[in-house]
Image (cartoon, grey):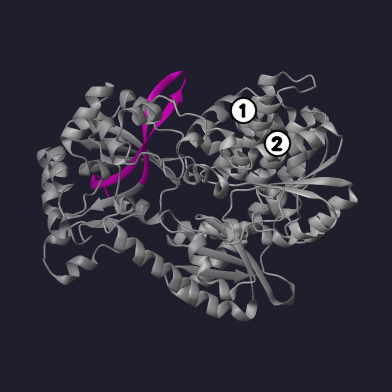
């Protein structure tokens, strides 16, 4: 039997025990236990920002890598960094470049051009490094599959140190001088959470531990804070698991970036209209990251790298303006490609596919964004492919939580010329002649993986509607303060989502351009406001058809500060109209009246009248607490609004 929210499955005695030991509200203890944070020490580390840093030398090849780099610095060798064109790759490049610059090293950074060079270290880039006089190549955020390039480097006596976080191939990189990768780590599962920038940051930590001496005028604490901030940018933008060391890295990295005075960083935030003193994870995800990515998507990522490295405001201003121009181009190209991709998917797969592959004459730089938008639209793994010359298709894939995209694509390897990536994102290429077969194979692979997941865990928390049920009477600043202790949020530590309802919506006021609403919610004798941004048209139509309406909502609690006054605000993520009229006749037509069925959380239509009656009698908390433990088969009670 599956409850409607995760906290309902937590035994009361376990929650009470943890709450007493840590001095927490019982509700907060239930949230922790529902996220499998069960030990007292683990809970303290999670809530009170006490996660420990891992030892960089837990990477088995780290000492050899550090000794070789420091020898190259000491002997004035030319060190060539080979990075990647996304945010993680650009920040990883800037981390290592900043450390080498602080040590007075001779260095050069090569970031491949997306179309001309493709992804990662390849033999032509090795030759370019050789022409620059390089005797040591250090890859960041790539290289774990670069066996051909390593062999080319060996033939011209260039040492290669690989630092990467992507999925490796089966064979070892025997030609590399050192491999700094989670597959060669004392605790591979722990190290797997690091982004490419995180691995590069660990490399600089190890360099500082072995030889802390650095010439230059920048104080050590500012230099190290900058490197941590860059690593946080990479972790957030590459959607790495927000657990363990990553949570501390992002939390402290954001603090470092809020006080950073580097001109390139400040101008990037200024162009993105971000208040740097209040920098948040969402600012990185929705404002900073897309601009850094725009350089590599629409032109060359070297522009973003140079902006981060810039030390003069005049130079940084020109680079920031160029990135802003490229970001406008990126938005326009993405919007066009996304509309075409959605129409194509619906024509091929129908409205509710299980896995999709779209293909079109789109800029290669935007297909990753298109894939992500397809995931959001259809709720399934998606791959978007750009048509290149000579019948070649190249693209990117994204997947929702719970599906290993890399595993799915690996099952389709016979149809691909290349692929790589990790669970949440991949890059791949294939010939146009293989597209139809690849579509079939990819859908079959996703279906097989989902079947395996169901066999292992038939009651997945991914399918539950929320973290907990929230009576409006318990909403306030105290609960907000506890919810904020669960931040920073990201994969494997999603924002707390709470189920509110049944409630009466007494008032709906349009905000901004009319696509947002402020709702006045009433539960018993308690009234609260909630804000719903980008209200789906169906939801707006239902609310405009007449108030009051009996509804339920999935909400997050967020801080709102207005004119110096701090309040806890309910932010609506999804909404339902609870319609008792559909139960006037217990027939098959009753089930169909809900418009479309909700995936994962299903409510029995016969409870509609009970819910409406509960609203009138103001006995909602007891009703929903009982409901949360029932095994309910159908969603006919709920008319989906989103």
Residue at image location 81% in from the left, 60% down from the top: 124
Instruction: Return the x and y of residue 172 as percentages of the image width and height.
Output: 62, 57
Residue at image location 27% in from the left, 57% down from the top: 639
Q: Is residue 337 visible?
A: yes
Question: Nearer the N terminus, badge 1 or badge 2?
Answer: 2
Residue 121 horizontal side relative to residue 239, left or right: right
Residue 65's disc is none
* Disc 1 element: helix
**Pick the front one: 604 or 513:** 604
Instruction: Return the x and y of residue 500 as percentages of the image width and height.
Output: 26, 41
**Pick the front one: 313 or 169:** 169
Residue under label 1: 257
Q: How many marks?
A: 2
Residues in magenta, as a range: 546-573
Residue 26 horizontal side relative to residue 575, left or right: left
Residue 66's disc is 2
**Pick the front one: 482 or 162:** 162
């Amino acid at each position: 039997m599956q409850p409607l929210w995760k906290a309902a499955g937590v035994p009361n005695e376990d929650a009470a025990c943890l709450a007493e030991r840590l001095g927490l509200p019982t509700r907060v203890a239930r949230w922790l236990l529902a996220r499998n944070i069960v030990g007292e020490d683990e809970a303290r580390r999670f809530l009170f920002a006490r996660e420990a840093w891992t030892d960089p030398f837990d990477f088995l090849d780290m000492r050899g890598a550090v000794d070789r780099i420091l020898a190259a610095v000491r002997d004035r060798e030319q060190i060539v960094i080979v990075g990647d064109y996304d945010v993680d790759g650009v920040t990883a490049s800037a981390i290592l470049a900043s450390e080498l610059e602080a040590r007075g090293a001779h260095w050069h950074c090569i970031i491949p051009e997306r179309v001309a060079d493709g992804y990662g270290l390849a033999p032509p880039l090795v030759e370019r490094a050789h022409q620059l006089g390089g005797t040591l190549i250090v890859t960041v955020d790539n290289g774990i599959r670069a066996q051909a390039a390593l062999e080319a480097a060996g033939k011209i006596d260039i040492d290669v140190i690989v630092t990467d976080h992507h999925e490796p191939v089966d064979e070892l990189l025997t030609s590399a001088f050192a491999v700094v990768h989670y597959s060669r780590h004392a605790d591979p599962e722990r190290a797997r959470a690091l982004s490419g920038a995180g691995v590069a940051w660990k490399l600089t930590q190890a360099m500082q531990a072995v030889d802390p001496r650095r010439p230059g005028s920048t104080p050590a604490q500012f230099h190290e804070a900058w490197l941590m901030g860059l690593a946080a940018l990479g972790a957030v933008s590459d959607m790495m698991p927000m657990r363990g060391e990553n949570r501390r890295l992002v939390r402290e990295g954001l603090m470092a970036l809020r006080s950073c005075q580097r001109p390139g960083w400040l101008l990037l935030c200024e162009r993105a209209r971000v208040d740097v003193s209040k920098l948040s994870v969402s600012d990185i995800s929705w404002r900073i990251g897309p601009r850094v990515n725009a350089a590599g998507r629409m032109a060359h990522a070297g522009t973003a790298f140079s902006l981060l490295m810039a030390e003069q405001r005049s130079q940084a201003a020109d680079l920031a303006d160029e990135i802003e121009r490229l970001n406008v181009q990126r938005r326009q190209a993405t919007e066009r490609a996304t509309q075409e991709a959605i129409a194509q998917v619906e024509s091929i797969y129908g409205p509710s596919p299980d896995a999709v592959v779209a293909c079109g004459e789109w800029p290669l730089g935007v297909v990753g964004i298109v894939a992500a938008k397809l995931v959001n639209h259809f709720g399934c793994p998606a791959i978007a492919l750009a048509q290149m010359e000579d019948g070649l298709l190249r693209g990117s894939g994204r997947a929702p939580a719970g599906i290993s995209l890399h595993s799915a694509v690996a099952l389709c390897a016979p149809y691909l010329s290349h692929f790589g990536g990790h669970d949440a994102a991949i890059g791949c290429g294939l010939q146009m002649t293989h597209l139809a077969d690849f579509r079939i194979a990819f859908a079959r692979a996703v279906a097989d993986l989902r079947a395996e997941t169901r066999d292992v865990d038939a009651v997945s928390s991914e399918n539950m509607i929320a973290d907990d049920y929230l009576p409006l009477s318990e909403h306030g600043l105290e609960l907000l303060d506890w919810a904020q202790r669960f931040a920073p949020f990201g994969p494997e530590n999603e924002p707390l989502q709470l189920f509110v309802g049944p409630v009466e919506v007494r008032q709906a006021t349009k905000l901004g351009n009319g696509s947002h609403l402020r709702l006045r919610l009433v539960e018993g004798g308690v009234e609260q406001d909630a804000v719903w941004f980008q209200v789906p048209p169906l939801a707006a139509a239902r609310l405009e058809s007449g108030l009051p309406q009996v509804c339920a909502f999935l909400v997050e609690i967020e801080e709102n500060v207005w004119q110096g006054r701090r309040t806890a605000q309910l932010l609506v993520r999804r909404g339902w109209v609870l319609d008792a009229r559909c139960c006037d006749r217990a027939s098959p037509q009753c089930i169909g009246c809900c418009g479309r069925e909700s995936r994962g959380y299903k409510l029995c239509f016969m409870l509609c009248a009970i819910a409406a009656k509960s609203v009138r009698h103001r006995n909602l908390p007891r009703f929903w607490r009982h409901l949360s433990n029932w095994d309910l088969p159908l969603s006919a009670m709920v008319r989906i609004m989103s």
